[in-house]
Image (cartoon, rainbow, N blue to C red):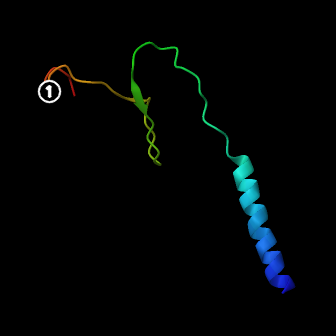
C-alpha cells in the first residue's frame, strides 16, 4: 500500500511540476503593420531564415515567383 501511495505522489508531483512550468503565450501585437504568417521549420536540417507565406493576387498564384 505504501508503494502505491509513493507511486501516486510521484505522478502527482510530476504533473504539478509540468503544469507550473507552462508559460502563457505572449499577447503582444506585432509592430510590423504587414499581416504575415511566419512558419518556423522544426527539423534536424537548418533553414536559413524564416519561411514567409503571402497571399496571391491571382487565384492560380501566377503573379508570384517560386
Q: Position of residue 15 (x, y in %)?
A: 72, 60
Task: Categorize mark 1 by other alpha carbons within 10 Å: few (<14), some (14-19), many (20+).
Answer: few
Q: Residue furthest right?
A: 2
Q: Quarter-wise, where is residue 11 in the image?
A: bottom right
Query: Residue at the location (22% across, 23% down)?
Result: 56
The relative height of residue 51 versus residue 42 in the rendered view (above or below) is: above
Q: Position of residue 60 (x, y in %)?
A: 13, 29
Nearest the eye: 52 or 11: 11
| Residue receiving disc 1 | 59
The relative height of residue 2 versus residue 60 in the rendered view (above or below) is: below
Nearest the eye: 14 or 51: 14
Helix, strand or loop at label 1? It is loop
Look at the image and tell me in which quarter the N terminus lies: bottom right
Q: Quarter-wise, where is residue 4 in the image?
A: bottom right
Query: Residue at the location (86% across, 83% down)?
Result: 2
Q: Residue furthest bottom?
A: 1
Quick check: 6 left or right of 51?
Answer: right
How many tags in the picture?
Answer: 1
Query: Residue at the location (19% across, 19% down)?
Result: 57
Quick check: 10 left or right of 38?
Answer: right
Q: Position of residue 64 (x, y in %)?
A: 20, 22
Look at the image and tell me in which quarter the C terminus lies: top left
Q: Quarter-wise, where is residue 26 in the image?
A: top right
Query: Residue at the location (14% across, 27% down)?
Result: 59
Q: Position of residue 61 (x, y in %)?
A: 16, 26
The relative height of residue 45 versus residue 64 in the rendered view (above or below) is: below
Quick check: 52 left or right of 5?
Answer: left
Quick check: 23 left or right of 17?
Answer: left
Amino acid at each position: 500500500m505504501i508503494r502505491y501511495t509513493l507511486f501516486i505522489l510521484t505522478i502527482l508531483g510530476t504533473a504539478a511540476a509540468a503544469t507550473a512550468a507552462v508559460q502563457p503565450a505572449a499577447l503582444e501585437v506585432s509592430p510590423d503593420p504587414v499581416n504575415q504568417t511566419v512558419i518556423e521549420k522544426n527539423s534536424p536540417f537548418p533553414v536559413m531564415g524564416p519561411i514567409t507565406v503571402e497571399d496571391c493576387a491571382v487565384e492560380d498564384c501566377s503573379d508570384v515567383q517560386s
